[in-house]
Amino acid sequence: MNSHLETRKKINKGANKSIYEKKLTCRNCYRNCQMTLLMEDCSILCVEGDSCRKGQIFAYKEVRKNKAC
């Protein structure tokens, strides 16, 4: 599976914690959803733009696989 994962911007930076957005293109089905992940450190807070349940699962796997934090 090929995905596109990039950090867009930091939203808030606190005392050792930062909240930021990541863009991810899901390659799990034919839709190729453009998802936005709201992240805090290495945890996903919210997934937007996924058209099916597969997208959300894909996002969690990609973040864990790429250690994208």
Image (cartoon, rainbow, N blue to C red):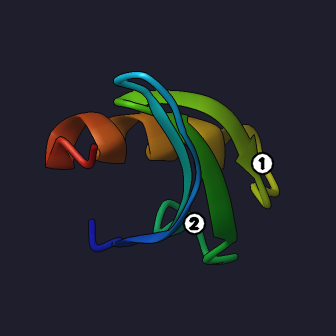
Above or below, comparing residue 36 to residue 52 in the picture: below
Residue 3 shows which numbered tag?
none
**Relative image position of residue 45 (x, y in whole percent):** 64, 28
Q: Which comes before the other along the chain, label 2 or label 1?
A: 2
Q: Considering depth in this image, is 14 or 55 the residue closer to the camera?
A: 14
Q: Amino acid at mark 2?
A: Cys
**Relative image position of residue 29 (x, y in whole percent):** 57, 66
**46 left or right, relative to 20:** right
**31 left or right, relative to 10:** right
- The answer to whether residue 25 of the structure is visible from this angle is no
Q: Amino acid at mark 1?
A: Cys
Q: Quadrant of the N terminus?
A: bottom left
- The answer to whether residue 31 of the structure is visible from this angle is yes
Q: Quadrant of the C terminus?
A: top left
Above or below, comparing residue 3 to residue 40 in the picture: below
Residue 29 shows which numbered tag?
2
Residue 52 shows which numbered tag?
1
Give residue 65's quadrant in the image: top left
Give residue 23's quadrant in the image: bottom right
Instruction: Spot the residue most to the front.
Output: 15
Dot 1 falls on a residue whose secondary structure is loop
Residue at 42% x, 22% y: name it.
15
Pointers 2 and 1 in contact (C-beta within 8 Å): yes
**Relative image position of residue 4 (x, y in whole percent):** 37, 76
**Relative image position of residue 25 (x, y in whole percent):** 52, 73
Above or below, comparing residue 4 to residue 42 in the picture: below
Residue at 35% x, 30% y: name it.
42
Dot 2 falls on a residue whose secondary structure is loop
